[in-house]
Amino acid sequence: MKKLYKTYFVFIFAFFVGLTPGLTQVGVLAAETNLDACSLLKESNPESVLGEPVGEALPLLQQSNADVIVSQCSYSAKSSLYKSISLLVKYVYKFENPKNSKAFVESQQLDFGDFKFEPHEVTGLGDVAVSLAAPGTFQLWVFWKKHYQMSVVLDGFDDRNEALKRTKEVAQIVLNKL
């Protein structure tokens, strides 16, 4: 019963200060989407993804405002901080996802000094999916439902095919949950 009173108080307070539309939109969407990267990454079994025991989850970002809901989390192998998996998930209200992998690649700055990321289109995930690889680092971007985005980053794997397989498994779990 106390929780119900708190909910009404927050809603009434927000109404009087003019926050109702934003509060309602963000609150409802956050509840519907459950953008918690640590929970989503935990469900993908990070120990299995990395192939060895991992440390505690490291929440990197949790933000919600009128423009975006974003969450990021990482797990590192206990044996090495250089072997890790991280997940960034976000919902962007006022931005529409790229229509294809070429549009995504053209919108990015893919030159990181000596590291040249090689973009490749990935099929079977979301509306658009692109992988970027550099020595020891693999990143999979997935865009779906017009406003959802995720990035799965796997560090410490030199085998591009194995990294793609593992990041696709994580991405599919996230897609199934959201």
Image (cartoon, grey):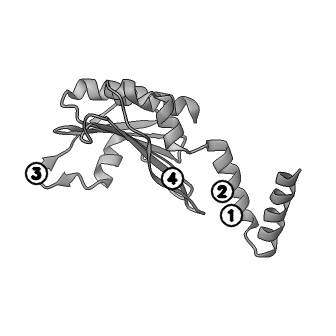
Residue 112, position as x, y percentages in the image: 18, 54
Mark 3 or 4, nearer chain start: 4
Disc on res. 114:
3
Residue 159 appears left or right of 125:
left
Is the residue 12 above or below the residue 174 in the image?
Answer: below
Residue found at the very far right of the displayed protein = 1
Mark 2 touching mark 1, by CB under 8 A? yes
- Residue type at mark 4? Val
Is the residue 12 above or below the residue 44 in the image?
Answer: below
Residue 112 appears left or right of 30:
left
Which residue is label 1 attached to? 22
The residue shown at (32%, 54%) is 107
Which residue is label 4 attached to? 70
Mark 1 or 4, nearer chain start: 1
Q: Residues within 10 Å of mark 3 (few under 14, many from 20)?
A: few
The residue shown at (26%, 24%) is 162
Mark 4 or 2, nearer chain start: 2
What SS does tag 2 mark?
helix
Q: Residues within 10 Å of mark 4 (few under 14, many from 20)?
A: many
Residue found at the very far bottom of the displayed protein = 17
The Cα–Cα distance between marks 3 and 4, rounded to whole angstroms, is 30 Å
The residue shown at (84%, 67%) is 12
What SS does tag 3 mark?
loop
Residue 21, position as x, y percentages in the image: 73, 64
Residue 26 appears left or right of 116:
right
- Front disc: 1 or 4: 4
Q: How many marks?
A: 4
The Cα–Cα distance between marks 2 and 3, rounded to whole angstroms, is 41 Å
Which residue is label 2 attached to? 26
